[in-house]
Amino acid sequence: MKIISFGSMNIDKVYQVENFVLPGETILADGIQLNVGGKGLNQSVAAARAGACVVHAGAVGEDGAMLTDFMKDAGVDISQIQVLPGQSGHAIIQVDSTGHNCIIVYGGTNRDFTKEYIDKVLTEKGEPGDVVLMQYEVNEVPYMIRRAHELGLKVAFNPSPIPKSMEDLPLDCVDYFIVNEVEGAAIAGIQEANPDYKKVLEILSEKYPAAVIVLTLGDAGVLCKKGEETYTHDIYRVKAVDTTAAGDTFCGYFLAGLCAGEDIPKCLEMASAASAIAVSRPGAAPSIPLYQEVVEFLKER
C-alpha cells in the first residue's frame, strides 16, 4: 500500500521579520533562507520520512533540480515528476517573531497538470488500496479525484488553499478529508467567525458518511471521526519557530500511519508529535522530522 501524491513543489524564499508588512509599508527583513517547499512536496517528504512508500507526481521547471534532489534524498519516488519549460512554483514567506507566517505562492509549473498525465500516473502506478493524495496548489483537482475513485483507489484530500467554489469538486468520492478549522467550516457551509468545531465535524460526517474526517484545530489539537467513532488528540506544546509545514507534516504522517496499518489513535499521536517537532524548527520541508525522531520525542513525553 503506497501513497501517490499529486502535489505542488515550490522554491521558498523565507524572510524573518519582526511583524508582517502592512499595505504601503516597507520593512527590513532580519534574515532570509532559500528552502524547498510546496504543500505537495512537504506532504510527500513527511509521508516518506514516516516510512511510507511515496510516489510524487508533479512538474518542475528547468530551475527545479533542488526540489527533485531533495525529494529523492528524502526517499520519495520521483520517477513520475516532469521537467517542463518555465519556472517552478515558488513562494514568498514572511515569518514573524512569534513563528507565525504569511505566504504568497506563484504556481508556475505546478499549474501545468494535464488529464493525460494524470491518467498515465494513476494507471501505471496505482494499485488497489493505494492512497491518492492531493491539495489545491495544483490544477485539475476535480479530475484527479474522479479518476482515482473510478480506478478504485483511496482519495485523500487536503483542500488548501480553499477553492473559490466547492461546486465542481466531487467530494462524495473522497475517502479521507484532512482539513484545518477554516477549511472544514468552508466545506460544512458554516460562515460563523468562531464556529463550534464539534458541530463542523458532525456536519462533515453527515455529508460524507463513508469518509474519515480529520479536523486539525491548531492549539486545540485535532478531532477525527470515522463512522460512529470520534477521536481526539491534544497538541504537544513546544516553542514555535516556524509553523509553515505543520499541517503538511501532520497530513503526511497521518496517512503513512494508515498505510502501515496503524489504528487512528496511533496515527493521530504520531502525526501530532511530528508536527510539533516541525514547528520547533525553521523552514518548511527541512523541518520535517524522521520517524525515529518522532519515536524519541514521544518517549521523552
Image: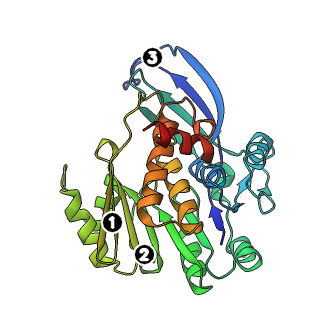
Whether 196 is drawn above or below 264: the answer is above
- Where residue 240 sits in the image (x, y, percent)? 42, 29
Residue 169 x, y percent position in the rendering: 45, 73
The residue under the point 55% across, 82% down is 149
Q: Position of residue 49 (x, y in %)?
A: 65, 49
Query: Would residue 140 be seen by someone viewing this image from the given angle?
Result: no
What's the CA distance linking mark 1 and mark 2? 9 Å
> From this viewpoint, is residue 66 visible?
yes
Q: Which labelled disc corresponds to residue 111?
A: none
Question: On the image, numbered disc 1 is attached to which residue?
Answer: 187
Q: Please rate how many residues cluster around mark 3, counting C-alpha atoms within 10 Å: few if below 14, some from 14 to 19, many from 20.
A: few
Determine contact: label 1, label 2, CB under 8 Å.
yes
Q: Which residue is tagged 3?
A: 26
Identify which amino acid the numbered label 1 is placed on.
Ile
Residue at 45 percent of width and 39 percent of height: 276
* Residue 141: % across, % down: 55, 68
Q: Earlier in the sequence, mark 3 or mark 1?
A: 3
Q: Which numbered circle lies on residue 171? A: 2
Q: Is residue 108 left or right of residue 218?
A: right
Q: Is residue 168 left or right of residue 227?
A: right
**Residue at position x 49%, y 41% in the image:** 299
Mark 1 or mark 2: whose residue is earlier in sequence: 2
- Compared with 286, 255 (above or below) is below
Callout 1: 10 Å neighbours few (<14), some, many (20+)? some
Please tell me in which quadrant of the rendered image residue 58 appears.
Answer: bottom right
Residue drawn 39% across the image and 73% down it: 167
